[in-house]
Image: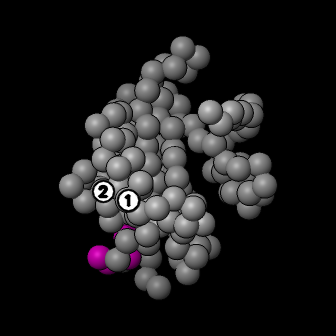
Amino acid sequence: MKDNAFYIRIIDSNEIFSIIPLLQKLGNYSVSEALLKERLQEMTQQNYECLGIFDAEKLIGTCGLWFQTRHYAGKSVEMDHVIIDDAYRSHGIGKMLIEFISDYAKKKSCNWVELNSYVHNFPSHKFFYNQGFVAKGYHFVKEL
């Protein structure tokens, strides 16, 4: 794989459904394609942007970006549903992704980049620590 073939760009809202196969894999196919389409359609109407990671024209990864203002951080971006195709891991793409998001967030006057990582996903914890992230707390959920 040639590194210079990889690039990252914001996915236009009219192309948003292109990320569905990656989202299905990330979620172990637990959410139907129809429901993913419905949710993505709604998300694009909120403070959500999505980026794609490409090898030439092939979509190999994605990451959602939620922009908000937090009382403790000011303007920030939260990374969501980060996934890179298994075949492309350990090629420096994750580092390239974090650099892209950091630069993009600075251009949008953000003070912080935030993310959640499942407690059992130790490889991601190590990766994000190595990229300069620090753990600030726990993310709790309650299903309704």
Which of the pair 87/47 is nearer the observer?
A: 47
Position of residue 116 relative to residue 91, above or below, is: above
Please provide percent x and percent y for residue 103: 41, 44
Task: Tell which residue pokes out farthest to the top in this image.
Answer: 71
Q: Report if the CB atoms under discs 2 and 1 are less than 8 Å apart.
A: no
Q: Is residue 122 left or right of residue 80?
A: right
Could you tell me the amino acid type at mark 2? Answer: Ile
Q: Which mark is residue 34?
A: 1
Disc number for residue 16: 2
**Figure label count:** 2
What residue type is disc 1 on? Ala
Regarding residue 126, the answer to whether it shows in the image is no
In the rendered view, does 2 fall on the left or right side of 18? right
What span is colored magenta in the figure?
A: 52-57
Left or right? Give the position of 49 relative to 1.
left
Mark 1 residue element: helix
> Does residue 40 show up magenta in the picture?
no
* Image position, residue 4 (x, y; %): 38, 75
Prevalent SS, magenta region: strand
The residues tagged by marks 2 and 1 sit, at their Cα atoms, a distance apart of 13 Å
Estimate the x, y position of residue 87 in percent, counting from the top left: 55, 81
Mark 2 falls on what kind of element?
helix
Q: Quadrant of residue 18?
A: bottom left
